[in-house]
Image (tube, grey):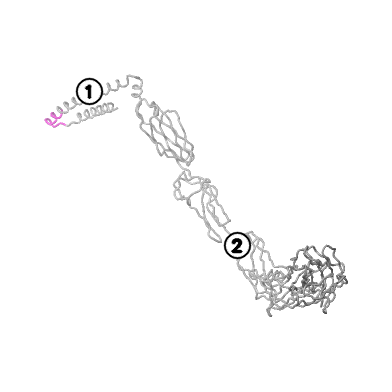
Amino acid sequence: MLLCVFGRTLSGIDKCQICSRREDVQVFRTMTDFNFLAALETVTGLYGETLQIPCNNGAMKAEDVLITKWKYDKGDGLSGDLLVKQKNQNVSISAADEYKGRVSLAANSSLLLSAATLADQRTFTCMEVVGADIAEYPVNVVVHKFPTELEISEQSKDLEIGKLTKLGTCTARDANPPANITWLKNGKPLLADGNRISIQTSVLVDPVTGLSTTTSTLEYSAEKEDKNAQFTCSTRGLLSSPVTFSITYSTENIILTVIAEAPLVEGDNVTLKCEADGNPAPTGFNFHLKGEVVTVKDGDTYAINNVSRDTTGEYKCSLIDDPSMESSEDITVNYLDINFSPSGKIVKRAGEGLPLDLNIYSSGEAKVSWTKDGAEMEKKPDLNKLTYSQSGVYECEVTMGPLRRKASFQLVVEGAPAVKQLSQQLSDDRLHKVLICEAEGFPKPVVSWSINGTLLDESDFVDGMITHKIKVVPSANLTVSCTVSNEFGSDTRPINVSSLNWKVRVDKQGNDQTKVVVGVVVGVLIATAVIGLAYWLYMKKSKQGSWKTGEKENGSSEEEKKLEEKVEENSQKAEV
């Protein structure tokens, strides 16, 4: 057969017939003698969009191509022309029927096919004439379409544990190729296992459009864990809206909960709450209240107000239709009572005892603490032998958790006063003596002295103690007494106070003080020596006479005593 292209023959042909018209061009379907047919490739497009079908992928330069022609396979060995373009000329479109107005040629010789449908799934062929060569490039076209929607219908109202139940049907409409539907639970795929999961799929093709509708039905045997689980279906990136189902199962466990502030004390309120794991949940319960049964038909709680220690005990709840299924809890009401004596104001005499009696009645271990006049004490006060310092307000506090109980009493220790200490000291200026009298007693003792003095200070009366200070300038050695008294009696204590006269005279000498003291000391020493010598001579003579006559020495003894006192007095002056 002769192949002619617009007035000239192709190489390899001995005889040529000149073709004067474009319509006379014929292309052989079989090119065994020329070996320039290209391999078949496939192009995939989307439904309703424009397809771009390549011609030899644009390998030929546009300026080298003499003729480009597109045609399509009509079936039964027939082909239909679409368009042709000669070099330096406009495109000539010859498409008819379903391709009329839908085809055009791109700059790279690709065929542009608009509004793709499933009917366009066929072979399109591009023919190019370059120089003395001619080649054909067939392209297979496939058209895909995503489903228009994905939804779950025919949903079950609830699922029953252990029973295979139709959960719903997922539908993917108008797709090509037919959609593959996957079921998911909480985002994880479900696979049919012939036991708890069954999936049935069917595909229906529209005879007009050729599009497919896929339906997938899921049958599912639920578990307790499926409560609130979300089921979805998906295909090609599309995901349906999630659906949830009520899971039906009978009660297997029941729980009683005690709702109250911790720890529970007398006067608080308590709520008993009974819960069962069945679905639907029971609408009522029996509450067992220490031998009494109360039925609550439309609720799961029971309130106990203003509890007391008698409320302590075991409580239960059970199902109305199955009393054997029950739950129990113990309720403990904490309480604290104390009985304490003495109380009020207690007056005791010093030296007496005061017993303290504390009895504690509580639901647990209690802690006891003591204070005296608001100050914390390390231990329980010992009041077996009372002293004035133990007077005050005592408070006992008993605690157990948040519970606190207090008891208090006022102790007054009274009695006759006593001088605890009487002392003296030289003042800082060494010009007078300070006498200090410390006494205790209650009520507050009155302090008096046997000598007139100047009051320096009187301390506060604290814990039955008082300190009284006076200053005196004694001109001679004397005994001074401090007397304390109140309505219960009195007490007196003396103290010897030495004179300050010599010190005053010495102090008046001013700058001659040292000389006077030295002179006095020397004179006293000489006088003492003289008197001592005379005394020795006298004693010697007297003793000799006595030995001779045997007379008693009474008179001599008295004289000796006087002399010794004189010597001692002079010695004291010398020491000063």
In terms of secondary structure, what is the magenta stretch mainly? helix
Picture coordinates of residue 536, whole percent (x, y): 17, 27
Please check the rendered image and state whether residue 56 is part of the magenta-colored stretch, yes or no: no
Picture coordinates of residue 45, whole percent (x, y): 77, 68
Is mark 2 in CB contact (under 8 Å) with mark 1? no
Residue assigned mark 2: 333
Most extreme residue toward the front, as rendered?
14
Q: Nearer the viewer, residue 283 or 534?
A: 283
At label 1, the amino acid type is Ile
At label 2, the amino acid type is Val
Residue 328 visible to an observer of this rendering: yes
Numbered range of the magenta stretch: 542-551
Few, some or many residues within 10 Å of mark 1 (<14, 14–19, 20+)? few
Q: Secondary structure beneath disc 1?
A: helix
Quadrant of the frame with the C terminus: top left
Q: Nearer the viewer, residue 413 or 519?
A: 519
Residue assigned mark 1: 526
